[in-house]
Amino acid sequence: MANNEDLFKQIISHAKEYGFIFPSSEIYDGLSAVYDYGQNGVELKNNIKQYWWKAMVQYHENIVGLDSAIFMHPTIWKASGHVDAFNDPLIDNKDSKKRYRADVLIEDHIQKIEDKIDKEIEKAKKRFNNFDEVLYRQTNTRVLQYQAQVDDIRTRFAELMNNNDLVGLKALIEELGIACPISGTRNWTDVRQFNLMFATKLGSVADGADTIYLRPETAQGIFVNFLNIYKTGRMKLPFGIAQIGKAFRNEIVARQFIFRMREFEQMEMQFFVKPGEELKWFDYWKQTRLQWHKDLGIPAENYRFHDHEKLAHYANAATDIEFKFPFGFKELEGIHSRTNFDLSQHEQYSGKKLRYFDPELNENYVPYVIETSIGVDRMFLAVFSHAYTEETLEDGSTRTVLRLPAKLAPYKVAVLPLVKKDGLPEIGQEVFDMLKKDFMVQYEDKDAIGRRYRRQDAIGTPFCVTIDNQTKEDQTVTVRERDTMEQYRLPIADLTVELLKKLR
Ligand code: GAP
C-alpha cells in the first residue's frame, strides 16, 4: 500500500500518462505552477463546470449567469481592497534561499500535531473493541496534550493574522522550532507582505499606458455588473449571479500540483439578499453547497466545514468546505457572508448608486451578499484523487481504475469490436455513430480486449460495449461495467435508453 506521498506522486503521473494534465510549456522545461489540460482532462473539467452551472443557474430560477472580461478598470481593485491588502506574509530561509508563506509554515506545523492525534486514535481503534472515539479524545492524556498545543497555537496564530503582526509571526515560527524542509535550519529572514496580483500595461507605454491587473478573482466582475443584471433581468431579491472564469495569483509558494496554481479557474456565485437576512442565506448555501459535493457519491467523511476564526473586516460569517486530499484536509470551497462591503465600496469609488429598490418597503438599499466560491482545478483534483484506485483482482492481477462519478467521466462509453475482422469493426462503427449523438464515445479496435478494458478503466469510462460474433446473429452486445466489471448482454436497439438510465 503506497503512503500518501507516493500515492500523490502516482496520481500526478497517472494524470500525465493518460492525457489529463501536462505541465505547461513542457518542451521548454515547464512553467512553475501552470498546467495544461489534455484530451481527457478538458472533458472532465468541462463536465465539472457543467455540473456546477446546472446546479446553480439551471436549477435556480433566481440565479443567472455572466461572463465578464478578465481585464477591468484598475480602480476596481483599489475599491475591492486588493491593491492594498491582497497580500501573503512571506519568509525566506537564508541557507536554502527558499521562500515560504509564513502562515502555511505554521498551518503545516499544526497539521503535523493533528496527524499525531490521528495516529493515536488509529492505534487505539485497533487495540480496543467498542472503541468510543469521543470519549478517548476527552480522556487520553497524550491526545489531550496534543489537542491543547493545537488550540493554543491556533488562538495565537489567529490573533497575529488578525492584527497583521509580522514580527509576531516570525517569533511564533521561531518558538515552534519550525525548520526549512530543504536546509533543515531555522535561519529565517523577517516576514514581509507580498501582493499577489499580476500587473500589466494596457495600451502602449508611449501612449501613457495604464497599469491594470489580471483579475485575482472573478467575483468583482459580478459586483460591477450588479446594476446591469438587476435592471435588464428585472431581478427581485434574493437573486444570484454566477460566473466561471480564469483568475490569476502570483502565489509565493505554488505547490501540490493543481491545488495552488498561478493561473486557475473559479466558479463563483454572488447571492444578493435583503440586509438582515444574510445569515439565514449563509446557512442555506452552506448546506446546499455541501449537498452538491455529496451528490457526486463521494462519501461524506471526505468533507468537513472549517468555520473561519479570522473573519475579514467586511465579513460576518465565513466557512470553508474542506476535502480530504492525499495530503490532508484542505480548503476546496469558500462560502462567505460579505455584508454590503463590495457594492458599497464600488458605490464610493465609482460615484454610481448600486442600490436595489424594495417595492415592499418602498426604499432603496445596498443588498447584502453571500458568496460561494470554488476552484475548478481544485475540484478536479478532489474528484480525480478520490477516484484513483489500484486494485488487486481475484486472479492476483492488478488494475488501475479511475472510479469517477459517471456524470463527470470524460467518456461515458467505449465501443470495442472483439476482433478487427469478420465484419465486427463495421458493426462497431454503426454502434459508435448511434451512441455519439447522446454520449462522448471512444471507438477502439486495436490490442487484446483485456488491454482495451484496462485503458478505459484508467481514464474512468463507466461502460464498455463489446461487439462479438453473437452480435451478428442476434444484434446484442456485451456491456461491461467499470466498477464491478460485471458483464451482461443488451440489444443494440436498447443501448441508448439503458445507458442513459444508468448515467442518470
Ligand atoms: N472571491 C473569493 C475568493 O476568491 P478564495 O478563498 O481566495 O476566495 C476561492 O478562493 C476558491 O478558489 C478556493 O476555495 C479555491 O478552490 C480556489 N483557489 C484559490 N486560489 C487558488 C489557486 N492559487 N489555485 C487553485 N485554486 C485556487
Image (cartoon, rainbow, N blue to C red):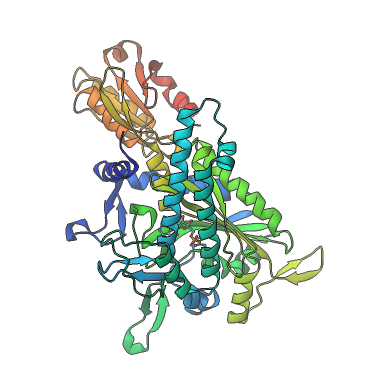
Where is residue 151 shown, x and y percent of the image?
54, 55
Give the vertical position of 328 relative to 226 (above or below): above
Question: In the image, 342: left or right of 491?
Answer: right
Where is residue 355 shown, x and y percent of the image?
69, 71
Where is residue 288 shown, x and y percent of the image?
61, 46
Q: Tell which of 138 and 410 is nearer to you.
A: 138
Which residue appears farthest toward the right when viewing the image? 361
Which residue appears farthest toward the front when viewing the image? 141
Q: Quadrant of residue 265?
A: bottom left
Give the vertical position of 399 relative to 14 (above or below): above
Where is residue 44 shown, x and y percent of the image?
39, 44
Residue at 42% over, 77% down: 212
Residue 351 seen in render: yes
Q: Tell which of 354 and 299 is nearer to you.
A: 299
Picture mark count? 0
Q: Quadrant of residue 237?
A: bottom right
Q: Quadrant of residue 235?
A: bottom right
- Quarter of the picture containing the N terminus is top left
Q: Tell which of 183 and 348 is nearer to you.
A: 183
Residue 503 seen in render: no
Residue at 32% over, 40% down: 3
Residue at 64% over, 74% down: 344
